[in-house]
Image: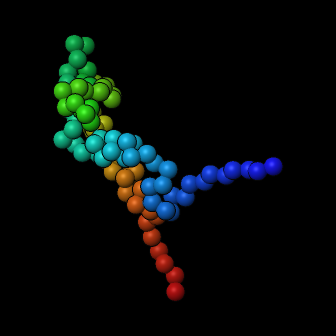
Amino acid sequence: MTLFYKTYSWSQGDSGIPEETRMLWEHIANKKNWRIVQLPNGFYQAEHSDIKDENVWHDTTRRETLKGAEAAIDGSVDHYTKKLEFLKGPKVVKTFK
């Protein structure tokens, strides 16, 4: 019997992450690709543009205030920036001698 094992090691960089996914993360991590629109019910919706067509927008979250919507965008940008940093491999935080 032959067994096939496939593993991913995050210490080896972005192995296992499709190029398309990485490109989406880079796109979402850039705040210029976001906008906030006000909905008829008074809520604010955070949207990011499509990678291929800048005239197409994908709704992401709704908030009661403009400040809340902008905070949601900032949180998303921060989240995806961290994901991209993680693809570069582990971050050394302490070494021993």
Measuring from the top left, give residue 4's x and y in whole percent. 69, 50
Quick one: 71 or 5, which is closer to the camera? 5
Measuring from the top left, give residue 56's x and y in whole percent. 23, 26
Rendered view: 96 above or below 5: below
Rendered view: 51 above or below 19: above
Q: Residue furthest bottom?
A: 97
Q: Quadrant of residue 23?
A: top left
Residue 65 appears anywhere in the view: no
Rendered view: 19 above or below 65: below
Quick one: 48 or 45, which is closer to the camera? 48
State the residue at coordinates (60%, 54%). 7
Q: Quadrant of residue 33?
A: top left
| Color style of the picture | rainbow
Q: Is residue 83 left or right of residue 31?
A: right
Q: Residue furthest front?
A: 1
State the residue at coordinates (33%, 51%). 81
State the residue at coordinates (47%, 74%). 94
Q: Residue furthest top?
A: 40
Measuring from the top left, give residue 46's x and y in whole percent. 26, 30
Quick one: 52 or 62, which is closer to the camera? 52
Measuring from the top left, give residue 57's x and y in whole percent. 25, 27
State the residue at coordinates (20%, 21%). 38
Residue 57 appears anywhere in the view: yes
Q: Is residue 63 left or right of residue 40?
A: right
Q: Is residue 52 left or right of residue 21?
A: left
Total number of numbered labels?
0
